[in-house]
Image (cartoon, coloured by chain):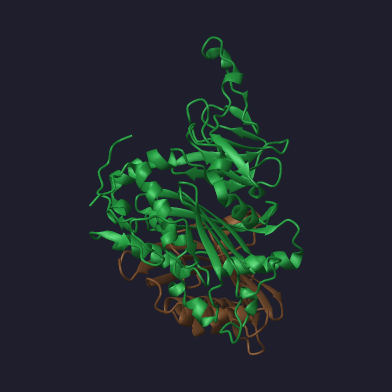
Chain colours: A green, B brown
Amino acid sequence: MTEIKLSWPKNYNEVPKEAFVREDIYAEEVKRIFHGTEWQPVAHESELPNPGDFKTYRLAGVPLLIGRDVEGVVRVFYNACSHRGNQLETAVMGNKTEFECPYHRWLFDSKGDLVGCPNPREFLPGFNKADYPLAQPRFDIFFGLIFVTLSAGTEPLLEYLGDSQNTLRELLAGDGRLKLLGYQKVRYDSNWKSYTDNDGYHAPLLHQAFKMLNWQGGKGRQFAVTKRGHICFESALSVATGPSVLKDKSLIEFKGQDPAVGSRIVSLFPTFVSTKHLDVINLRFATPIDAATVEVHYAYFAHQDDDEDMVHHRLRQSSNLLGPCGLISMEDASIFHRIHIGNHTPGSAIFQKGVHDPLKLESEFLQNDESGNLPRWEYYRSVMGFERATV
Amino acid sequence: MMQTDISLEAALNALLLADAHALDSKDMPGWLGNYADEEAAAYYCRSAENSEHGLALGFMYDDCRARLEDRVTFVNDIWAGTFQDYRTRHFVQLTSFDRVDATTLEMRSNFSVFMTPKDSGITQVLAAGQYLDTVRQDKNGELKLLSRRAELDTSVLPRYLVYPI
């Protein structure tokens, strides 16, 4: 670890803007956070429904190969040959029972074992294929959601999730039996923290759509859990009543079975945001590209028990409502860019709504409070070793 | 080209250019006007990556005329004033067309779309891909899009989309 200096304000509701733009801080974040003691979601099992299915993913630059082996077991490997480290698989997704490295023709089965390599008699004396499986990071699975940590020191996953487990499980349809509908992938010109600071929730003032749809904010609960400040939202939905500007009202129709808590959001430190809103189930796998760019893969799901009509409804709603081009959320995407530009100015970003005492951290918030982000910021500050001012 | 009908090809090209012109002019009613006045009129925008893996989800999924009309409302009314605006330039090239029946044709074309955000002024490629169109020909010979699927080679967009591709 390298010690990085950043003057952090005394008040919990202030975040120095430098934290969003400094390259030296970003380099240290990669070490301390993304390669550190965090569990980071990289896929859901339903993205790999069949034996041999795989997906590749870069987690803060680290290439991963996430696959279901021929016996149906999900495994996560580093996507690099155990010989010279060549990137093993280049496809984003697919189905293979064997992976061959083109560099020296080393061949791995779906369990990661090295099953073939040409001319092994020319290798080191005593060379044994069994010593060269694909390397694996630590991974664990929660209702189908596959988490990876690049540190041996991270606590067990359930402990890491803490009291977010219930909201997350319900968001994953209660049983995790999802069916992949597809992806929307986008890069934002924004520091990863600006993205996560604003993707989970923000004041509905931004969303003209809510107003035009006569869509009143539902009553809800926002709470932060664990020392990391993972944020959970559980809100009743008040589906639009009265006149709508939309000719096709199915976009905002709610056909689900969960009207009491129609909207759930779980935002896990550092970058994961997941949401279930109306009939949209959306897992956002986000990873920093550099200090000024974050790439987000919005993955959308149906439930395995859905009938054809419900799948179709979810497809239409998912495509059009909450993503980087969605009716409600396109504006968010624009805000990410603008916040990042604005963060190149002196001073601090200041949180106001829901802050009762700037010298205290709380863990329960009203639905529209922006103070829900503050426990996460306090954790970030402590991981990064930034000292809070005392006066 | 399967067809040798030069006037038909010219008419298809005119339809392609009319759509590009409407989009680049941010003329959403004009964009809508390029679509057939039928309930089944549809516009989809999705990555080829999704399509190749049998995933129907799109960036935009307007599968009926009412939804196309709502797309105009999104851009002109709901989102007005909330985003960093950008200019686009669509370059389209007809690659093939076939007649399906007396009133229907299928057409493929390549596209590339440049984007220039108004604030930065720096031009970059927004997306490249192909249009897979079904075209309706009315009794007067006029051509309209019955459905268009903008299938993007660009699976990771460099920004959010406000306007259809």
x and y, in percent, of residue A139 in the image: 57, 37
In this rendering, does residue A94 appear at all? yes
x and y, in percent, of residue A193 in the image: 39, 54
Q: Residue at x 68, y 65 (%)?
A: A258
Q: Is residue A379 above or below residue A367?
A: above
Residue nearer the viewer, A356 or A141: A356
x and y, in percent, of residue A190 in the image: 37, 57
x and y, in percent, of residue A222 in the image: 51, 61
Residue nearer the viewer, A350 or A299: A350
Residue nearer the viewer, A135 or A22: A22
Tell me where residue A33 sits by quadrant.
top left
Tell me where residue B122 sits by quadrant.
bottom left
Q: Is residue A140 above or below residue B82?
A: above
Q: Residue at x 53, y 9 (%)?
A: A125
Q: Residue at x 29, y 63 (%)?
A: A342
In this rendering, does residue B4 appear at all? no
